[in-house]
Amino acid sequence: MKSTGQNPTLSIVIPCYNEQEALPIFYKEITQVLAQMALPYALLFVNDGSNDKTLSILRDFAEKDSHVKYLSFSRNFGKEAAMYAGLSYANGDYVAVMDADMQDPPSLLPDMMEILRGGEYDCVAARRVNRNGEPPIRSWFARQFYKLFATISDADIVDGARDFRLMKRKMADAIVSLKEYNRFSKGIFGWVGFRTCWLPYENVARAAGETKWSFWKLLKYAIDGIINFSEVPLKIASWWGMGFSGFSFLMLVFIVLRRLVFGDPVAGWASTICVIIFVGGIQLLSAGIVGQYIAKVYAEVKNRPRYIISEENLRAEEQTDGPQT
Ligand code: UDP
Ligand code: MG
């Protein structure tokens, strides 16, 4: 799908991992919405190594509908890799990213398009105003994460922001130009800048299937996000170092003075051990934090492909100009 000059084109990137139940519902709804919007479009599904019938459903769609394009990964590379691949291949004037499970309501697209066409913004992003239908403990952790992230990183991310957004070509290009291996899209979207309009909407529960995120997966994702977009944890390690050095110097002065004044009674074995264990713990923790960053650096320098495609139906002419990596 090439830009036609006057009539702008729209590419929609949809990462899918085991979405056999949700896909037919999503496809039906999005095609209806796009038909009303009356502009040339392509649906670019990225099958992220699903082990259910997702791929055969996509083949089916593609056979019947020339708007449907798909990429299929050789294994599960994660949603970040799927979004990156989709954005690399999407070549519309406008590019949207949305989930296959209907949690990103297709009905918002016409409004988003309207806002972008107004010319004031480069990107419209959906923001959940509530987290209904989500376990409260998960919501609480999510809120704490957003607060912490806002304090210690310079990428601006908003609580409740989803990956669902519609952006102009130039922003999609900017995102693809960030080729890092450890991708944290919420941070990347904020980092590239551009004028973003936040479109609030009520949270919607998944239409079918199950969330792919366990609590631990989310926690790991949050930690990755912080490490990718902030150097504060590294600095904390040196602050601890400085704090303890200062403290131990004062202790030394105190102990020497006490020795001079009171002599040398053998005492304080327990307190010595406590201090040794405590400082040892802090040292290990700091080494661990440094290790986390080194692991990220290692993954970056290996520079492995972000994803491997095992099957796709992009036409040959389109392959020549994508991906823009
Ligand atoms: N997804 C993916 N690869 C993964 C996990 C998820 O492509 O490894 C896709 C999934 O198919 C869905 C979107 O990412 O379209 C969001 O996933 P999910 O609904 O599980 O996340 P949640 O909405 O609960 O945050
Ligand atoms: Mg979902």
Image: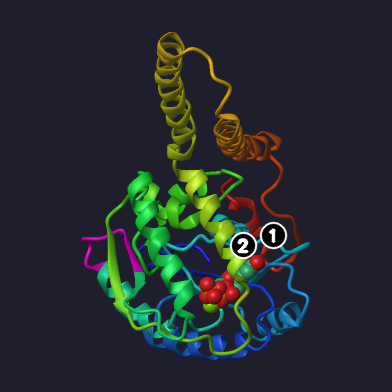
Please state the total of marks drawn on the protein image: 2
Q: Look at the picture and state if 37 lies above or below 81.
A: below
Residue interval drawn in magenta: 117-125
Lower sequence index among marks 1 and 2: 1
Residue 66's image quarter? bottom right
Confirm or reject: label 1 Cβ below 8 Å from ligand 1.
Answer: yes
Asked if the stretch drawn in magenta spans residue 39, the answer is no
Front residue of this view, candidates 148 and 285? 285
> Residue at the spot x=56%, y=26% of the render?
267
From the viewer's perspective, is 211 left or right of 29? right
The quadrant where ligand 1 appears is bottom right
The percent coordinates of residue 81 (x first, y second) are: 62, 57
Neighbourhood count class around disc 1 (C-alpha, 10 Å): few under 14, some 14–19, many 20 upward: some
> Residue at the spot x=66%, y=84% of the render?
61
Q: Are marks 1 and 2 in contact (CB under 8 Å)?
A: yes
Q: Which residue is mark 2?
A: 82
Q: Look at the picture and state if 127 lies above or below 83.
A: below
For label 2, the SS is helix
Question: Callout 1, which amino acid?
Answer: Phe
Q: Which residue is mark 1?
A: 77
Confirm or reject: label 2 Cβ below 8 Å from ligand 1.
Answer: yes
Residue 15 seen by the camera: no
Front residue of this view, candidates 321 and 186? 186
> Residue at the spot x=49%, y=85% of the render?
30
